[in-house]
Amino acid sequence: MTRALAGLLVVDLTTEFWGGIGAALLGDFGADVVRIDPLQVAAPRSDDEASWNYEAELAQRNKTSVAVDLASERGRALVHELAAKADVLVTDRSLAELRALGLDYDALAALKPDLIYARGSGFGPEGPDRDLPAIDELAAARTGMMPILPQPGQPPVYPGHGLMYTAVMLAFGVLAALRHRRLTGEGQKVDTSLLAGNMYGASLDLQAFLAIGGDRFLEPISRLDAGNPMSGTVYMSEDGLWVTLTMPDTDRWWPHFAPLVDLALDDPRFDTHEKRCGEHRLEMMQVLERAFRRKPAAHWRRVFTERQLSADVIEDYDFPKADPQVYRNRYILDLEHPSLGPIKTLGFPIFMSETPARLFRTAPCRGQHTFEVLRDRLGYSEDAITALKDAGTIR
């Protein structure tokens, strides 16, 4: 089976989880991703963490690792040599650090003019805040979403999704730039930021606010203040799990929904959409609150499925871990880890019929592939590699 990105050489100069994911997505579809790991050893992990670095397993899978002393001139020269042979370089380091290391876009584009240089930043490549640290919580704080997520009177809630939006957009930007290079021969800089990722995570609300404005977009809304008792509303079941309803066109769903909650179709309080969402809205919510508390969540999921209603149960993390739908689509993988034995790990969010994503290799140890990369990619002899190792430049 062919790989969609076979033949693509990517140098991964990232330091953070989300930046690593952006590069890993390219590796999932067959790109050869060479990760540059610093020689410095990370702080010791606790006993509980030592068994499996689960973050690294996701962010560094399908990569080879070269351990290089970036503080040395010779170590930086090695990265220059790799970049000169690469199609793509991915980084999330600050502009000041990249310039200090001689690994900024101008320096590497001089070596490889058609290089795609992709950087994940905190707040974008331009403007007064372009040098602020790339921290997702700070970016999320600017988007307007955090104050409206909790119930009224509660503190703002950090959504935590900006990291993944940004990682996916980083990979997408690389692919768009590669397409442009194929047509023109030109390389370029690509930047996507945590600010942009968080804004796109809130795109529906932000776009509505830009178009309409109004205070309703600025304040949290109580669950009981929703405009439609059958859409965007949640109700607690008998066993404490919440049920969510997403049926905005209530007339369409009413004939199937009403009997499930012991309501007559011609109940004069709720027999039109206008009554359900208008004058009797709050009364209907109270009726539904009582109805859903009479049965456990499993009952509601079963009847929702039987009637093909747009509703479901809100689950904890243990649900996808055992959901056959998740495994059928390879969103979670069971695999035999070479060191740890059987484990579960997140799979692939994109399906492709002919060139699917695959787990080609688990996350490498630091410097695991230094010898083979220098030999096979840069043409170094065994003696030359040994000399670099003895000098402390590589490991």
Image (tube, helix red, strand yellow):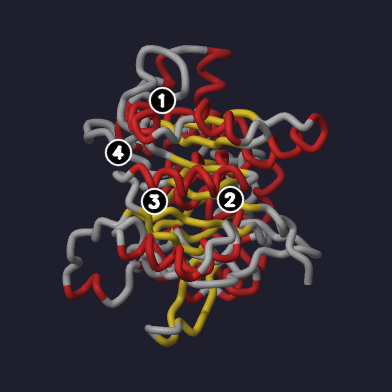
Residue at (59% x, 71% y) in the render: 360
Residue at (46% x, 16% y) in the render: 126
Task: Tell me whether the residue at label 1 lies in contact with that at label 4, contact meaning CB atoms closer than 8 angstroms.
Answer: no
Residue at (49% x, 39% y) in the render: 166
The residue tagged 3 is: 17
- Classify 373 as above or below 281: below
- Classify 9 as above or below 73: below
The mark closer to the camera, 1 or 2, is 2
The mark closer to the camera, 3 or 4, is 3
Closer to the camera in the image, 44 or 70: 70
- Classify 263 as above or below 361: above
How far from the left and from the top, in percent, is residue 39? 30, 57
The residue tagged 2 is: 10
Q: Residues within 10 Å of mark 3 (few under 14, many from 20)?
A: some
Q: Which mark is residue 123?
A: 1
Task: Tell me whether the residue at label 2 lies in contact with that at label 3, contact meaning CB atoms closer than 8 angstroms.
Answer: no
Residue type, numbered disc 3: Phe
Q: Which mark is residue 157?
A: 4
Mark closer to the chain start, 2 or 3: 2
Task: Tell me whether the residue at label 1 lies in contact with that at label 2, contact meaning CB atoms closer than 8 angstroms.
Answer: no
Residue type, numbered disc 2: Val
